Amino acid sequence: MRIKLKLFSIAKDLGGFDEQVVEVPPDSVAEDVLHSLIQKNTKFIDWKKSLRYAVNLEYVSDDFPLHDGDEVAVIPPVSGG
Amino acid sequence: MHEITRNRIDVENVIRSVVSPEAGAVNVFIGTTRNHSSGRTVTSLEYEAYEPMATRMLDMIIREAWNQWDVKNISVVHRIGRVGIGEASVVIAVSSSHRDEAFRASRFLIDRLKDGVPIWKREFFDDGSVEWSLHSHAQKTETEAG
């Protein structure tokens, strides 16, 4: 299935893109998007624990199941304000 | 009202948006950009947002504040893009019949904003380096925002 993957802040710098349509295996969960990112840049391993995920504009747990067409965002620690 | 804007925030306009004849108080919180970070000199800052999600979350936290306190009107405006030192990056205005509710709701709103709304700050240092500010959890205990 295909999802739209969005990266922000440090994740965007490490991944080298801000938005990409990516193919993920069926039964993938939110944190699985990290696998392909780690293959691109192993520094993602250091960030694993501080990254959160959002699916279709809402925070989800790491094991949230993904569906075809989902917009999945990798959310590093926020620093607004 | 809530807004994410690339323009300089017009504080008076934000205040005007919450003023109500039924309100006896308007509390305004302004987060301004600091010229230092962990002992280093910051020359300017840049904010980026996951805009559709940030907008949605602002809407959500405003509703939460409304449900929790007896307040009249709430406005939250966050600026993104390049922001000069000492400028407002966020303005929160709350009107209420009595001041205590407005103070409490404002505090709640800025805390919730800093805790989860997908907005990120990048600091430009005087030595030419540029870094994302990624220690938001440690900053939670500070009383200052921005």
Image (spheres, coloured by chain):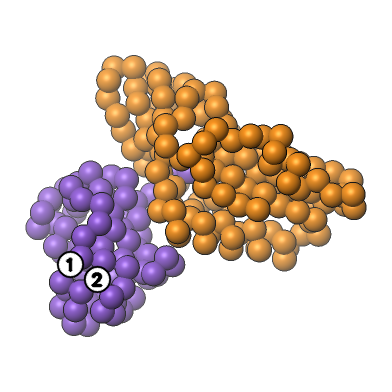
B26 to the left or right of B22:
left
A29 relative to B97 in the view: left or right: left
Residue B46 in the image: x percent, y percent? 40, 34
Q: Which residue is mark 2?
A: A3
| Residue located 23% across and 44% down the image | A13
Residue in the image at 37% along x and 35% along y: B122
- Give coordinates of residue B29: x percent, y percent: 67, 38
Against A68, is A49 above or below? above
Q: Nearer the viewer, residue B94 or B80?
A: B80
How far from the left and from the top, in percent, is residue B32?
Answer: 56, 30
Q: Pick the residue in front: B54 or A62.
A: B54
Q: Circle 2 sits in a helix, a strand or a loop, which is it? A: strand
Residue lying at the far left of the rendered structure: A39
Q: Is residue A36 above or below residue B28?
A: below
User: In the rendered image, what is the letter of the chain coloured orange?
Assistant: B
Give the letter of the chain under mark 1: A
Q: CA distance from mark 1 to mark 2?
A: 6 Å
Which sits earlier in the primary sequence, circle 1 or circle 2? 2
Q: Are marks 1 and 2 on the same chain?
A: yes
Circle 1: residue type: Val
Chain A, colour shown: purple
Furthest residue toward bottom: A27
Q: Is residue B9 visible?
A: yes
Left or right, B104 with reference to B92: right
Mark 1: give few (<14), some (14-19) or many (20+) Cα within 10 Å.
Answer: few
Residue A30: quarter of image = bottom left
